């Protein structure tokens, strides 16, 4: 029996040793020139090589066939056995071993993790967001962009712009309306027009320097591979030694237990089973320990590699900028025309003297360079020199250069790009190997490309309110570390966030339908995929290109205060207290009129807190808000089986000013208010959504997609007043404002959302356009809607609509009003009717005393 146990011991050591051996991490850049073919065993040379593939295996081109049916494979058609990490063979899709349910291959997870690694990382002053309505001063004026191409698109109010942006062209003033000359000078942009780089820097000279940099980068990746291999070897040796020591202790204890006294066969069998279980448990624990050590080692090595890569790119960027500046200076010295030079050395970080809207007011002004970036992104280039020359070769200003690089990165979608594992530094995708291995971020890549274009660019490190962040969270660790760029264009440092600017939308028709497929189905599916690729739309977030510092500070806090680019920098604590907003907040021109608005809002003695959001007057006819309320520390959105939404009252109010030439007030903007009544003590999370739609889009009744614009943590420390939920009406704002904006239904009798009524009440509206099929429903806590339906009716007299209500008992009621617009008749039949759509709602307190 002892010999049998020793044999089991030896077998167990062998099994775990194989586990250590097969699970070692693949080095990112092993020797790519002398490898053996997995199929035939002979040396694979570079000209006839496929690989590296799984666990860095290689094949001859002729040997790259399915292991089962020997059908010819390509890098796009081959499959690996994801259920067995030791199986390095390749298969066709028909013969690849299938993964069982609930099983994930570690290598696949590793690749996905590598491609999606994190990229590198009670006070609101005037530089952030002024309280109340902003005054009109020099910084608020939007002038004609100096970067337009002379086709009329440079003027924000001229024709030629895409109509989809018409709702967002706000804050524009014609410069002819200015009566003070110095106001124009205060907003004058430094025009840095440059000669095409081909005129002063020969492409061969730039490529020569790039090749020098490429060799240094290759050496760096080789060092990475050696360091990883050495660290993995040390880790495996240590774990193997620890395994053998622990197993020896376990075996010795087992042998002592057997030798203590003569035991029966049954007792020996029990001890053997016990020993076997203990050994299996030890092996399990050692495997878990190995995986944890492997993960920690990989993370530490990756951090080191990222820092080393960033340092090397910094060195290379300086050298490339020096070369470009030298050649540019030589060229300009020979030019008779004196141009306003781009600075040879990077200027110190200072607040930009102009805003983003002083540079451009509509993304369509970059339509030509954006389209160029999209076209270049469809192809692959072998050198950064070729890539940047294609991008900036025809650009006439520094802003256009930065723009086309930004758009190329946002279009390329580097997070989901498929990389060939054999990509060398001298191949098209080899340019982006740093992105693949996780050693280079979007921001380092943007800096690298800017240097090839002759633009000063820096990578800024700090904190961001990124995915997973909630208002009220403190920045106490590295969870929300991030990095971004500042590029020097238009005479100042300006922020760029390529990673957050990248947004990609794939045509939904590309998704295949479930079920079996025959040959014709496959042909149709292939046709659909081709059509989907042709119809692929590239979406991006323009907010993160040249973002104004006063807006950027809401989401990003640099470790170096001077890179806030604010006249009055704020502290980390003040950054935490700033409201948690998203880019759409600024796109819609929203603002907080109350200076005390913070990320965390505390309720008063009644358990209520109010958040008000201002919007520009030109958006009041198109913006629709919604909200969601849930418990802060969970996803529960109910309290005592009642939706938490019914503890929020949303309504719209108008801000008016007195015209000196008239006695009538005029509307200058809207305020939407969200009054939250906490149903219990504790913390709540209020998420506010918005969407800009036209009345025509809303009247179709089709579902609309709302996006988050801001979030707040609502804290109720001590609830003294119990608040009952609002009646269960349709979601959204209270009051008649929506009826006026979207339906042209003007209130005659009641302009406010809250009505104090007796036992009977009439509510009247004036129709400014044809509406039909009115319907109204009453709601009251504890009463069925069907029972209340007989207490509400309506009548239409000419263009006056009257709703008559009688209340069966005193209390609080909610009134929902629905209608639809009559469409214009066509030549084939009567007028079209739209869907019945929610129009507005009132909150009515009925009492005999009213």
Image (tube, rainbow, N blue to C red):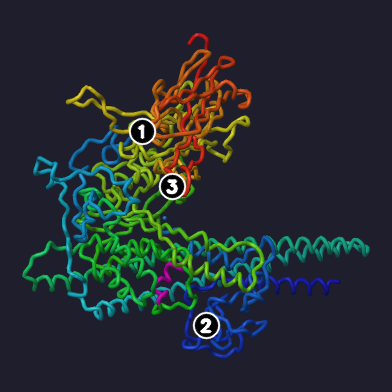
Name the N-terminal-most of marks 2 and 1.
Answer: 2
Name the N-terminal-most of marks 2 and 3.
Answer: 2
**Regarding mark 2 in the picture, which secondary structure is present there?**
strand
Q: Which residues are magenta?
A: 428-437
> Label 3: which residue?
826
**Regarding mark 3 in the picture, which secondary structure is present there?**
loop
Q: CA distance from mark 3 to mark 1?
A: 58 Å
Seen at 18% across and 75% down, the residue is 199
**Crowd rating for badge 2 (residues with CA inside 10 Å; few <14, some 14–19, many 20+):** many
- Which mark lies nearer to you, 2 or 3? 3
Q: Nearer the viewer, residue 733 or 202?
A: 733
Q: CA distance from mark 2 to mark 1?
A: 61 Å
The answer to whether residue 680 is visible is no
Question: Residue 305 occupies which quadrant of the picture?
Answer: bottom left
Q: In this rendering, is residue 564 above or below 319?
A: above
Seen at 56% across and 29% down, the residue is 728
Q: In this rendering, is residue 829 above or below 259?
A: above
> Label 2: which residue?
50
Q: Nearer the viewer, residue 19 or 238?
A: 19
> Label 1: which residue?
122
Query: Where in the figure is residue 78, as x and y percent of width and height?
Result: 58, 77
């Amino acid at each position: 029996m002892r010999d049998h146990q020793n044999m089991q011991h030896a077998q167990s050591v062998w099994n775990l040793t194989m586990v250590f051996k097969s699970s070692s991490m693949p080095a990112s850049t092993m020797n790519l020139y002398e490898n053996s073919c997995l199929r035939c065993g002979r040396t694979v040379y570079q000209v006839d090589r496929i690989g590296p593939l799984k666990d860095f295996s290689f094949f001859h081109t002729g040997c790259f066939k399915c292991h089962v049916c020997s059908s010819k494979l390509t890098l796009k058609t081959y499959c690996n056995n994801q259920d067995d990490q030791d199986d390095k063979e390749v298969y066709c899709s028909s013969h690849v071993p299938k993964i069982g349910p609930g099983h994930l291959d570690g290598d696949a997870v590793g690749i996905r993790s590598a491609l999606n690694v994190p990229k590198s990382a009670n006070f609101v002053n005037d530089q952030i967001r002024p309280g109340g309505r902003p005054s009109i001063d020099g910084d608020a004026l939007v002038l004609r962009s100096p970067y337009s191409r002379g086709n009329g698109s440079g003027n924000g109010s001229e024709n030629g712009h895409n109509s989809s942006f018409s709702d967002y062209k706000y804050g524009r003033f014609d410069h002819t309306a200015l009566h003070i000359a110095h106001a124009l000078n205060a907003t004058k942009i430094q025009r840095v027009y440059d000669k095409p780089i081909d005129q002063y820097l020969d492409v061969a000279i730039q490529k020569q320097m790039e090749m020098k940099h490429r060799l240094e980068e290759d050496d760096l990746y080789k060092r990475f591979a050696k360091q990883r291999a050495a660290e993995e070897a040390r880790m495996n040796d240590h774990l193997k030694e620890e395994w053998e020591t622990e197993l020896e202790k376990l075996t010795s204890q087992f042998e002592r237990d057997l030798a203590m006294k003569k035991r029966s066969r049954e007792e020996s069998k029990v001890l053997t089973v016990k020993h076997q279980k203990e050994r299996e448990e030890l092996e399990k624990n050692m495997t878990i320990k190995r995986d944890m050590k492997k993960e920690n080692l990989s993370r530490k090595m990756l951090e080191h590699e990222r820092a080393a890569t960033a340092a090397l790119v910094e060195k290379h960027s300086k050298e490339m900028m020096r070369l470009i500046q030298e050649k540019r200076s030589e060229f300009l010295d020979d030019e008779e025309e004196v141009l306003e030079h781009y600075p040879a050395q990077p200027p110190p970080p200072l607040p930009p003297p102009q805003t983003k809207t002083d540079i451009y007011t509509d993304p369509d002004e970059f339509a030509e360079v954006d389209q160029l970036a999209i076209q270049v992104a469809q192809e692959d280039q072998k050198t950064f020199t070729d890539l940047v020359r294609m991008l900036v070769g025809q650009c006439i200003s520094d802003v256009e250069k930065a723009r086309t690089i930004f758009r190329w990165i946002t279009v390329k979608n580097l997070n989901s790009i498929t990389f060939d594992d054999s990509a060398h530094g001298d191949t098209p995708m080899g340019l982006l190997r740093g992105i693949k291995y996780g050693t280079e971020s979007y921001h380092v890549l943007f800096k690298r490309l800017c240097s090839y274009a002759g633009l000063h660019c820096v990578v800024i490190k700090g904190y961001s309110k990124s995915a997973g962040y909630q208002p009220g969270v403190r920045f106490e660790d590295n969870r929300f570390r991030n990095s971004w760029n500042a590029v020097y264009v238009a005479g100042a440092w300006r922020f760029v966030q390529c990673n957050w600017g990248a947004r990609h939308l794939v045509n939904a028709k590309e998704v295949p339908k479930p079920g079996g497929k025959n040959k014709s189905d496959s042909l149709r599916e292939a046709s659909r995929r081709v059509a989907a690729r042709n119809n692929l739309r590239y979406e991006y977030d323009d907010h993160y290109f040249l973002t104004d510092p006063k807006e950027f500070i809401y989401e990003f806090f640099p470790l170096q205060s001077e890179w806030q680019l604010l006249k009055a920098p704020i502290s980390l604590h003040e950054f935490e207290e700033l409201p948690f907003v998203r880019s759409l907040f600024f796109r819609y021109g929203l603002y907080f009129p109350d200076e005390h608005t913070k990320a965390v809002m505390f309720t008063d003695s009644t358990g209520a807190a109010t958040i008000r959001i201002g919007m520009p007057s030109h958006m009041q006819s198109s913006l629709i808000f919604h909200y969601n309320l849930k418990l802060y520390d969970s996803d529960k959105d109910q309290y005592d089986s009642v939706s938490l939404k019914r503890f929020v009252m949303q309504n719209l109010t108008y801000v008016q000013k007195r015209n000196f030439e008239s006695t009538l007030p005029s509307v200058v903007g809207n305020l939407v208010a969200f009054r939250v009544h906490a149903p219990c003590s504790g913390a709540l999370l209020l998420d506010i959504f918005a969407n800009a739609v036209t009345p025509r889009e809303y009247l179709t009744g089709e579902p609309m997609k709302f996006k988050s614009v801001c979030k707040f943590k609502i804290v109720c420390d001590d609830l003294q007043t119990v608040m009952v939920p609002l009646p269960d009406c349709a979601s959204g704002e209270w009051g008649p404002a929506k009826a006026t904006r979207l339906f042209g239904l003007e209130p005659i009798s009641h302009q406010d959302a809250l009505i104090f009524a007796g036992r009977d009440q009439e509510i009247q509206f004036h129709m400014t356009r044809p509406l039909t099929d009115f319907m109204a429903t009453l709601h009251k806590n504890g009463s069925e809607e069907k029972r209340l339906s007989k207490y509400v009716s309506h009548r239409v007299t000419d263009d006056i609509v009257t709703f008559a209500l009688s209340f069966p008992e005193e209390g609080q009621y909610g009134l929902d009003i629905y209608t639809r617009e009559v469409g214009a008749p066509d030549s084939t039949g009567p007028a079209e009717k739209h869907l019945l759509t929610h129009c507005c709602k009132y909150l009515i307190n009925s009492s005999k005393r009213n």
